[in-house]
Amino acid sequence: MKTIDEMLHLDLLTPEQHYEIGAWIAQSDTPEQILKMPAPLWSAMERASEVMGIDKDLLRPPALDAAGL
């Protein structure tokens, strides 16, 4: 939920999209149910994720000093 809150704060999601996505996630008991989110909401999240560079962060190799954490 923190990520979609940040998307709202950055004006990458409308308040309505934020509410609908949050409600969908809250009522979903499994990741599979989340994946059944309506296409317009997925599209909004994909656009916001791209602007935020979320995919790039996930694909970046871990820092060499990360093991010391």
Image: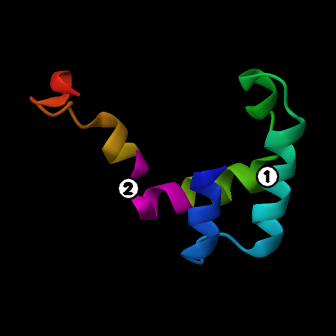
Q: Is residue 50 above or below residue 68?
A: below
Callout in the foreground (1, 2) = 1
Residue 35, percent from left and from top: 73, 32
Let me know if residue 11 is in the magenta part. no
- Structural crowding at the residue carrying mark 2, measured as other residues with C-alpha within 10 Å and reported as few (<14), some (14–19) or many (≥20): few
What amino acid is labelled 1 in the image? Answer: Gly
Image height of 44 relative to 25, above or below: below
Tell me the residue at 90%/37% (across/down): 27
Residue 58 falls left or right of residue 33: left
Crowding at mark 1 (Cα within 10 Å: few <14, some 14-19, many 20+) = some
**Residue 41 percent across, percent down from the top left:** 75, 54
Q: Magenta span covers which residues?
A: 48-54
Label 1 and label 2: CA atoms lie apart by: 20 Å
Q: Which mark is residue 22?
A: 1
x then y, percent, for residue 16: 83, 70
Q: Quadrant of residue 69?
A: top left
The kind of residue tagged 2 is Gly
Query: What residue does disc 2 label?
Result: 53
Q: Residue at horizontal 76%, vertical 48%?
A: 39
| Residue 49: percent from left, percent from top | 50, 55
Q: Is residue 46 left or right of residue 41?
A: left
